[in-house]
Image (tube, coloured by chain):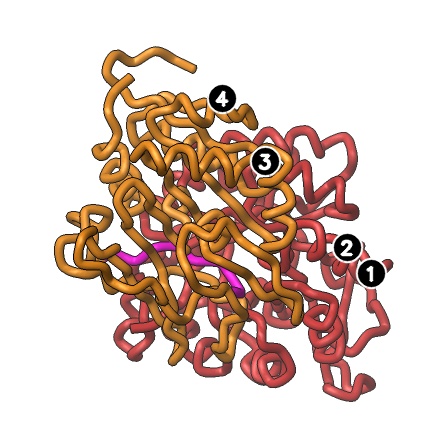
Amino acid sequence: MTSTPGAPCVVVLDYGFGNVRSAVRAVERAGAEVELTASFDRALAADGLVVPGVGAFAACMQGLAEVQGARAIGRRLAGGRPVLGICVGMQVLFAEGVEHGVTTAGCGEWPGRVERLRAKVVPHMGWNTVDPPAGSQMFAGIAAERFFFVHSYGVHDWLQPSGERIAAPRVTWSSHGSDRFVSAVENGPLWATQFHPEKSGDAGARLLRNWLDTLRGC
Amino acid sequence: MSVAVRVIPCLDVKDGRVVKGVNFVDLRDAGDPVEMARVYDAEGADELCFLDITASSDSRETTYDVVSRTAEQVFIPLTVGGGVRTVADVDRLLRAGADKVAMVTAAIERPQVMAEIADRFGSQVLVLSIDARRNADQPSGFEVTTHGGRRSAGLDAVKWARRGCDLGVGEILLNSMDADGTRAGFDLEMLAAVRAVCTVPLVASGGAGTVADFAPAVDAGADAVLAASVFHFGDLAIGQVKQALRAEGQPVR
């Protein structure tokens, strides 16, 4: 880790799933000091935690369990400390995932189910547009850009009721053909993207900078 | 809006250098792969593809190094093919920074390896690369070849694509060995035949010569278009291809 005064410290959680090298490099490029580690303590201590993820929901939950990932995420959020989930790292934040008829419990930060996409061509692979709500911090300056997606599963229904006492999460949607799914969520300290900002060129770099702007420096 | 048609420059890499020749013979040197990757990224390439065309074991370390240096500098998806045989090979390439791996020969020799890779890393990392050519003896009229088109694999190309999908591949890269290097356009009939049996993304490869060649490939069912020599030798720019696609009503980034 190089030392840049004022740069936020970010941990990319290394639990065996995800193109972690790309995530580390992209977050570094966006201006953070990045540590790739499976350490629970380091994951808690960082200014920001990135939870990457590719592959199967069940396998990722198993991998997360081995590094107490769900607990680290929950502890951070309880303290209002930022977490960014990417791809399957977003999917596991929901209540459950269904693959090949088998349901696996997720981290349960949000209600809802991750299920097979209904589009004609799956995986949904490539650069797609996003439809962020007004006031999105995540997509500030990049709401009209395309981002790189590669996934076969998604969340079709946002089920969290809007409360009167807390700010409603900002939910961003995308469509693959006629199949509409959640492509990003901003929920207080918990942000997540179904697409890969680390593979989305300059637009992705800006998104990561927007996230880093929500962290305090270390 | 919908997902954009991807325009993918393919870099054939040998001993750490980019090469490409007409019909895979008479190779010419077109530069440093990392530098080429940066240029293509800046030009708007949606993805990059490296094919290690020698893939002898002694050059493999060079390939990992090229992949790693590219992933350090280029923040768009990278597919790597050539000599990928095992789950361990895939693991190593992904760790070096590849996002997807493409298989040709090893998948033919032992199809089950496709399921093993898809189970371990997910379908999205695995591209089945099919080097196909016309052969009236196969039911679909297209056969699978190996060794850069020099040998027949004795398989029907359309059936083989379907088999790959059934075994869990996340994408088909369909390279016409008849059209490769001719710059006479993609093999549209072959694309349509494979599209009809597969629900994974389909990448058209082989035969691109002018900007007008790309939109018909998309109409025939391709989700992405790949080319090598027309980009390497400066005959076409990525932006020109996208402009032509857009003019035909196709979504591009």
In the picture provided, is A80 more to the left or to the right than B24? left
In the picture provided, is A100 more to the left or to the right than A153? right
Q: Which residues are magenta?
A: A145-153
Mark 3 residue type: Tyr
Q: Position of residue B230 (x, y in %)?
A: 45, 57
Please tell me whether residue B122 is drawn above or below residue B216 in the rendered image: above
Whether pointer 2 and pointer 1 mark residues with C-beta atoms closer than 8 Å, the reply is: yes
Cα–Cα span, label 1 and label 3: 27 Å
Please tell me whether residue B156 is drawn above or below residue B109 in the rendered image: below
Q: Give the secondary structure at mark 4.
A: helix
Q: Give the secondary structure at mark 3.
A: loop
Please tell me whether residue B205 is drawn above or below residue A88 in the rendered image: below
Q: Give the secondary structure at mark 1.
A: helix
Chain A as rendered: colour: orange
Mark 3 chain = A
Chain B as rendered: colour: red
Please tell me whether residue B136 is drawn above or below residue A177 in the rendered image: below
Instruction: Look at the image and tell me whether residue A84 can be seen.
Output: yes
Residues marked 2 and 1, same chain: yes
Instruction: Check disc 2 and report the residue beneath it.
Output: B116
Front position in the image: B139 or A52: A52
Cα–Cα span, label 2 and label 1: 6 Å
Res A41 label:
4
Q: Residue furthest left?
A: A135
